[in-house]
Amino acid sequence: MANIAVLGHGVVGSGVLEVLTSHAASIAKRAKEEIHVKYILDLKEFPGLPYSDRFTKDFNVILNDPEVQIVVEVMGGLHPAYDFVKACLENGKSVVTSNKELVAQKGAELLAIAQANNLNFLFEASVGGGIPIIRPISQCLAANDVTEIAGILNGTTNFILTKMIREQMNFEDALKLAQQLGYAERNPSADVEGLDACRKICILASLAFGTHVYPDSVYTEGITKITLQDVDFADVWGGVIKLIGSVKKLENGQVHIMVCPMFVHRGSQLASVDDVFNGIMVRGDATGDVVFYGKGAGKLPTASAVVADVIDCVKHFKARKYLFWEDAKPNYVADFGSMETSAFVRVSAKDSDTALNTAADVFGKITPLLAKRPVQGEAGFTVENLTEKELSDKLAALEARGVKVEGRIRISDY
Amino acid sequence: MANIAVLGHGVVGSGVLEVLTSHAASIAKRAKEEIHVKYILDLKEFPGLPYSDRFTKDFNVILNDPEVQIVVEVMGGLHPAYDFVKACLENGKSVVTSNKELVAQKGAELLAIAQANNLNFLFEASVGGGIPIIRPISQCLAANDVTEIAGILNGTTNFILTKMIREQMNFEDALKLAQQLGYAERNPSADVEGLDACRKICILASLAFGTHVYPDSVYTEGITKITLQDVDFADVWGGVIKLIGSVKKLENGQVHIMVCPMFVHRGSQLASVDDVFNGIMVRGDATGDVVFYGKGAGKLPTASAVVADVIDCVKHFKARKYLFWEDAKPNYVADFGSMETSAFVRVSAKDSDTALNTAADVFGKITPLLAKRPVQGEAGFTVENLTEKELSDKLAALEARGVKVEGRIRISDY
């Protein structure tokens, strides 16, 4: 019998208990021994549950019990999760977590501690919820050099964008609906400003390329400025707007990593990832593009990913999994301004001809897009193959010449 | 150093050598030791290669060399592949294969021999080429009951259907093009008649539900009868025609398994899987729908999946992977005639009104579909929620009343 402890009895934590109970027989068969939850750490009281007697408010009870071999951290947030996880790894307990903030901020350090102590630190549930992605990247693609990863990594923003695209709902209304349905939190900024997607692409980048990328080194832009005009122009262009987290290995060894809304062509596998679903494309030199699709969040999908990691832990008490990456190094993330980009730009002036003519003058070459529902003075166009810095400079030049930049959305090539 | 032998130096075999050479350093790092190809078995001569000196024509050289710990079987076909693999497993060598015919026909037996000898028998490359699917099903979804799998499992037929849908090319021309491009063999029957897809859904069904399903127990229908009229009707209905292999666990413990062309709704993740790509949906009770997408065949994708298995083998010499299923049992595959179905039917009579009126009379309730390019005397309609036997009986009744059944395509609910 393997004894485990669960830190946190929130949505995911209670889901873990539910999955372990409802699938007990098949899990025991796969893990080759029974998995027993000895403790659940939570500050709240949960009377009336079949396992109410196993709650504790004292982390040290868990830490000091040598019978507990695996600790599941599903509290979320950095503190005290980080302190607890670190203490567990230093005290001979393997850790499974769904906490993307923890992995994105402290992954390299915790993996090093796990390695030094011959323990596992697993986090399949931290990216893509129930979609298997961490394990496929680290194992199945072992004989393959990953060159690029791009994905729709946040279900909340994808739900909002889908409502804007499909039902012409504006951003504010779509956000309110997402909050009503429980997809968005009351303070939605981590989702809509792109931070959640940023943490996830940091984890995937660190895993695929072996060097930790911290969220604060990543250019991150959310979807709060996206309007229905932009959605219309994307449609005319031939695609949809998606919030994309992407990372690409450059020939000089650096990585180009960013999170931003992008125009995605209708034919792309990512274009049809709708509602709260996630889709992650992994581009390999041998495999070509492989795409993983599914529910990126939710109680049971996330809990089942956590439990799959627990099973793997039980089976590998003495054979460490080879998840590992090194800590960040200077100049590893390429200078964002020097990266090449293509973009859609929406501008306004006293009339749309003036706007477009000035833009053509400033950019040299632009491709105007027809407006579906023309707005007086507005125009939209695309520009190709310039650097981020050139794009910013030229947009500033446009403003200096009296043309207002209403929006700017990058164009993806997947 | 781990010594391996490769049986067969065809497309996949030469790809395995290429991947092992081009990724030698990263593979050694992941496997934690160098992987050395000691022998390549092939009856042909391959002079001028950097590894020409390692070829042998005598399988016994490999079988009797105790240094060879892993044998990679990429010959294809049942004989002598089966005999060689069996001999290897009985003589202490783990086996990695890309041979779907072998796994579909002999999987249960070979897995049992591997288990008895504490060896690995791995076959990630047998389904979905470079798409990780065997490992995710067996590992990541361990804490999840798979209830259904449905997929586009054959790239050749998907290429042909895509040409028919996108370019209104007829079946014969699309097949010829596929042959010219090397996607289809000169004798294309294993692809176009559905047998290849059948082998793959048998492997997935066996793995997901733990009991071997042999290809000859699966209702299998190919795409040779699909016409551009059918493609048009699917478009009017709101979708596309795809060759789908599917298996579903029934409440009574049986499985409903089949391979046939199906109408797939445009909104489905499977509808946008085009050209030679594969897409596989795994439905789980906790995860919901997870879809895996990528190139289902090709030299390097398949070879990289084989090599990933080899790496896994090297890392698990003493810890067997838990791939396993039992042999087939009677009455496990549900009687096909009693399965519920919905279908599109295309009929002809002296005029389309007669055809539709007779159909309405025979079926009770039909939903006529408008023809995009009407053909004199023809009509198309859908029927819902009847058994396969009822559908056959009613189609026979239609014929008996002078209405010719031109085509019948099932309707999917994914």
Image (tube, coloured by chain):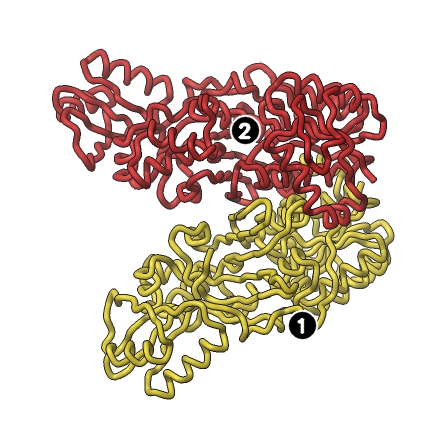
Chain colours: A red, B yellow
Q: In the image, residue B142 lies at what x, y percent?
A: 68, 46
Residue neighbourhood size for the residue with mark 2, other residues' Cα within 10 Å, grouped as few (<14), some (14–19), many (≥20): many
Q: Amino acid at mark 1?
A: Asn
Q: Would residue B337 be visible to someone looking at this image?
A: yes
Q: Amino acid at mark 2?
A: Lys
- Residue B120 lies, with reference to residue A307, above or below; the image says below
- Residue B308 lies, with reference to residue A212, above or below; the image says below
On the rendered structure, is B298 left or right of B71? Answer: left
Residue B228 picture quarter: bottom left
Q: Which residue is mark 1?
A: B331
Residue A394 picture quarter: top left
Q: Quadrant of the N terminus of chain A?
A: top right
Q: In the image, residue B331 lies at what x, y percent?
A: 67, 72
Q: In the image, residue B215 lies at what x, y percent?
A: 62, 69
Which is more toward the observer, B357 or A132? Answer: B357
Q: Which residue is mark 2?
A: A200
- Residue A389 lies, with reference to residue B282, above or below; the image says above
On the rendered structure, is B405 left or right of B287? Answer: left
Q: In the image, residue B366 lies at what x, y percent?
A: 34, 71
Which of the two discs, 2 and 1, sits closer to the camera? 1
Which residue is at a point 28% across and 82% down the rendered structure image?
B349
